[in-house]
Amino acid sequence: MQKGSADSGARDVAFKLLQGGSRGPRRGRLGIGSLEIPTPVFMPVGTRASVKTLGSEDLEEIGARLILGNTYHLHLRPGADLIRRRGGLRRFMSWSGGILTDSGGFQVHSLAALRKIRPEGIEFRSHLDGSSHFFTPEGVLDIQADLGSDISMVLDVCTTPPTEERRAREDMELTVGWAERSISRRRQMEHEGTWAGALFGIVQGSTFPHLRSRCARALAGLGFDGYALGGFSVGESAEERYPAMDAALGALPKASPRYLMGMGTPADILDAVGRGVDMFDCVLPTRNARKGTVYTWGGKLVVKKRIYAEDDSPLDPECRCPTCRRYSRAYLRHLFRVHEMLAGRLATIHTLAFYLELMGEIRRAVDEGRFAEFAARTRERFAGEPG
Amino acid sequence: MQKGSADSGARDVAFKLLQGGSRGPRRGRLGIGSLEIPTPVFMPVGTRASVKTLGSEDLEEIGARLILGNTYHLHLRPGADLIRRRGGLRRFMSWSGGILTDSGGFQVHSLAALRKIRPEGIEFRSHLDGSSHFFTPEGVLDIQADLGSDISMVLDVCTTPPTEERRAREDMELTVGWAERSISRRRQMEHEGTWAGALFGIVQGSTFPHLRSRCARALAGLGFDGYALGGFSVGESAEERYPAMDAALGALPKASPRYLMGMGTPADILDAVGRGVDMFDCVLPTRNARKGTVYTWGGKLVVKKRIYAEDDSPLDPECRCPTCRRYSRAYLRHLFRVHEMLAGRLATIHTLAFYLELMGEIRRAVDEGRFAEFAARTRERFAGEPG
């Protein structure tokens, strides 16, 4: 992979598969500079240079090592140029861990007004002020280089089901064409000395297994440092999802990391780890936490409920996070009820600590050859959760 | 003073005047259980069982030792009974320091709907749900005992200028009458074993020096553990304020702590310490911080301003707080601009750390007999601040 440059802040990235194959649960190690990040890994989402309600010291304290930044949001505010002049996103937010950034394509898809996909790229208007922007495969690599991402993503076209096969194929083919342009642009940036870190391709193809495997093979032929699965958890059923996911995973090179974008209830993660996914991100746990619903080893817990008004036990008696070491359900319920800002923070700390612990337990179960059993037992704890 | 009881969580309170007299700058030590709190002291305001945006661990980290809780807010939600059943406010919010609570009178005055002052107490409707409540001098002591306050305040009548002398005298006389009832109720609670901690009287009398001194003498005759100055910073001019404040301070017993309620820009604190005040609280620094204006040794700083967009220095280069050790003005400006919740938290941490450091410098200056010089120099840093 690529040599980090002092300018951007991005670092060498290397993945080593320690156990497992092209399908089924895997264990690996993602090296970013001197960081060694065991996989499967969950990445908290730091949308606008902050994992909402938390500082970088909080992420360090709960043991987060790799976070996600959103190119779309950071491009609009404060702007990638400004972040480059601050020494990159890591220095800007004083973060010692690794940073993966998305390409911005998904937020353009979900947030921007007047989005228009052209062969050259995506034209859109900012959801903040209506200003016009144009994302190209080349341009989003420049932006991510400015941000100093350790791991950058290519620009892709996300297909939302239900869709006809023809539309899914066209989007997928455009995604592959943009992936080729991304590889060319990276090569050029390497020559210019402006590239550092890793570049991941993104597999599209909607719910059509043969399109997914075609896309995966095409991207594998281009030689990315890792491969993401895009266009999942966008409205498809589980019956549509998993054959398509399996088709993609089966066609990807075994030795490279696989990243399932934006999808991650505990049940989702267990399903995907079982199929061969190494990396996850999802805003759902932190968004739920800010609204008063957290994950615990006893299942989901809606701490705003009246039944917790006089409950002096911590959110999760099995948890050792800063929130559970110190505060009761009764206190958190009160904070949520009176809309104190501390409420969302304490709940976010716990729910992310739970996620990081869940990933640790998953890795241990894979190491010890008992993942299927662990997954079945853990799924039961979250049975019936709406996600 | 009073013996703490295990039930409520309140502890023994003792004040020792180390230096100074009835007027002019003083140094003292407020003992609360095993805590030793040097005075003059500033108390962060934890309105609803949280200093907004902060956890108790954050207050500990910046060195806060004594905080204020609002009886009015806690009475309405979650209710003093519930807090008593949780072991008191300190245990409820996992706070290792001391707690002073106000009597609720001021919030009834400023927030409640349909307030009616009767000789027996204050009738009001909740600003949250319109429910009817009645605060009496006796009842607010019961509430504060339920909260487990180390230092409780009597119910008083706050007079807002401009006012005629007759009205100010009537309010002051009612305040003194309620103070007598408070002392009786405390004696009764001591016999019942339901009282712990200290009780402070509150001097009223508006902008009339002779009413202030009469009130102070009357309260002193009742033998409170400390004396608060109420009804300041409610619209009076500095010319009206300081003669009234001096009259009150001159009539209070030298050996008891004096607490200026709810007033505390740095300039206000310097003025009042110079006159003989030992304790302060004020929501202004934390409220300003949440809006992006912090105090620094360089003066007030509006971090949202465009000039800080590319400023990599900390809020205050002289500060060692967790915010200044780690984050730049540029990062904070970005967080405020995109309305990230972390913004208010980081600014609050800094501004409170500044206040606590300011109090430390004030104490050092008093110890070393150079308070007047220190105050003049420090006032210059904040010259022209609107407060």
Image (cartoon, coloured by chain):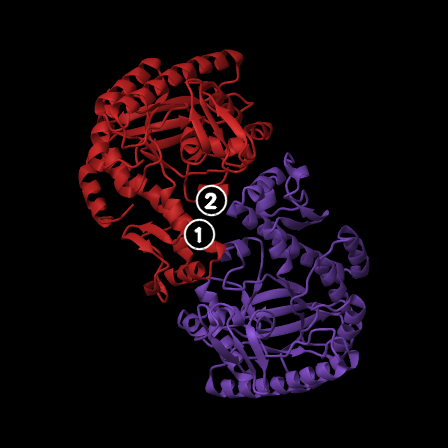
Chain colours: A red, B purple
- Gap between marks 2 and 1 measured at Cα: 9 Å
Camera-nearest residue between B315 and A57: B315
Picture coordinates of residue B346 (x, y %)? 56, 48
Task: Please report contact status of discs 2 and 1: CB closer than 8 Å, yes or no.
Answer: yes
Quadrant in which residue A268 is drawn: top left
Specify few, some or many for label 1: CA neighbours under 10 Å numbering under 14, 14-19, or 20 or more.
many
Point out the image quarter for the C terminus of chain A: top left
Q: Quadrant of the N terminus of chain A?
A: top left
Q: Secondary structure at mark 2?
A: loop
Coordinates of residue B227 in the picture (x, y in percent): 66, 76
Drawn side of residue B190 relative to residue B283, left or right: left
Please tell me which of labels 2 and 1 falls first in the chain: 2
Is residue B103 visible to us here? Answer: no
Residue matched to label 1: A344
- Looking at the image, which is closer to me, A101 or A15? A101
- In the image, residue B82 above or below residue B122: above
| Residue A85 picture quarter | top right
- Asked if both marks, 2 and 1, belong to the same chain, the answer given is yes
Residue identified by numbered label 2 = A52
